[in-house]
Amino acid sequence: MNIQQDLIRHYHWLRQYGYNDSHSGNASVRDHDQFWVTPTGACADLLEVGQLVQCPVDGSPGEGASLDAVLHAMVYRKSPRANALLHSHGAYSVAMTMHGEDFVPPDFEGAYYFNRIPVISIPYDQYLDLAADAVSDALVEHKVAVVRGHGVYATAESINLAYKWTCSFELSAKTCFLAQQAGTLSNKRRLTMPKRDKFIAQMKSQLDEGKAELQKLESKAGNARAEIREKSRQAIEELHEKRVVAEMKLKEFEHAGEEAWEDLKEEVERAWTAFKAGVDAFSDFSDHS
């Protein structure tokens, strides 16, 4: 079986097993400095080898090529090891990423293959202008990428491996959905590493600001009347304790495993809120004393 026949076979499978409808998605295989791609408007049930379009990796797509041919070419230029690219519309893969956040597989198999799957948000009316750059950039470091609300792109050294990544992602997304419906998995959006790091930096900054504000209030309280100073001392001690609790919770969150992030994030936020409310209340008391 030559690479064109293999391309047709895998494109048929995407349709046969529900990853695409009759006329959706596209697929390509690299052939040295060229690649073969499905034609625009192709019917997966009827597509034959003679209908595939040959395109240069560097240059304009061949006549009648898929509208995504430019994207395919860009993937091959940026990722020399990529020899195949499949674009599909698996229902669970699309549904579980509609919120626009990266997908972090909750199941063993999914996590084994994918640390995370990037989700790219592109306005629908700007897809043809923006998708090629955005998707090809994502696929330099990831096996799979999703355009939110649209579909999945999977690349690999072989078309069969790209098909494997497509199937594995869809099964992981389906498992996630079913587990949420069964109540065995929280449907809270899971934190991704970039959002986790951003949250940590934000909380550290807020705690530093709160600590500085508390020090100012402590200095101001030292100049108050004796009875006010005693009340202030007790309040300040309590606020320092709340600050320490918030810092400890943040440190615990920082060193926790992925599975504990969501619950610990809520604990950090509660501890911070308690500390901030206390500082604000004491500041108001100090202003009116």
Image: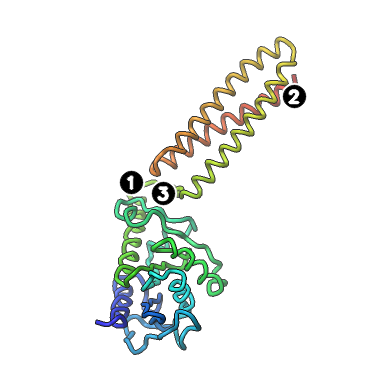
Q: Which mark is residue 184?
A: 1
Up-down relation of residue 178 to residue 50 (above or below): above
The residue carrying mark 2 is 287
Per the model, the C-alpha gap separating discs 3 and 2 is 44 Å
Mark 1 residue type: Thr
Provide residue 184's location: percent of width, then percent of height. Answer: 33, 46
Q: Which mark is residue 187?
A: 3
Viewer-side residue, 91 vs 104:
104
Mark 3 residue type: Asn
The local secondary structure at tag 2 comes to helix
The reply to whether callout 3 and callout 2 are in contact (CB within 8 Å) is no
Up-down relation of residue 188 to residue 29 (above or below): above
Give the farthest residue toward the top.
Answer: 226
Q: Quadrant of the C terminus?
A: top right
Residue at 33 percent across and 77 percent down: it is: 11
The local secondary structure at tag 1 comes to loop
Mark 2 residue type: Asp
The reply to whether callout 1 and callout 3 are in contact (CB within 8 Å) is no
Q: Earlier in the sequence, mark 1 or mark 2?
A: 1
Residue at 40 percent across and 69 percent down: it is: 89
Q: Earlier in the sequence, mark 3 or mark 2?
A: 3
Q: Quadrant of the N terminus?
A: bottom left
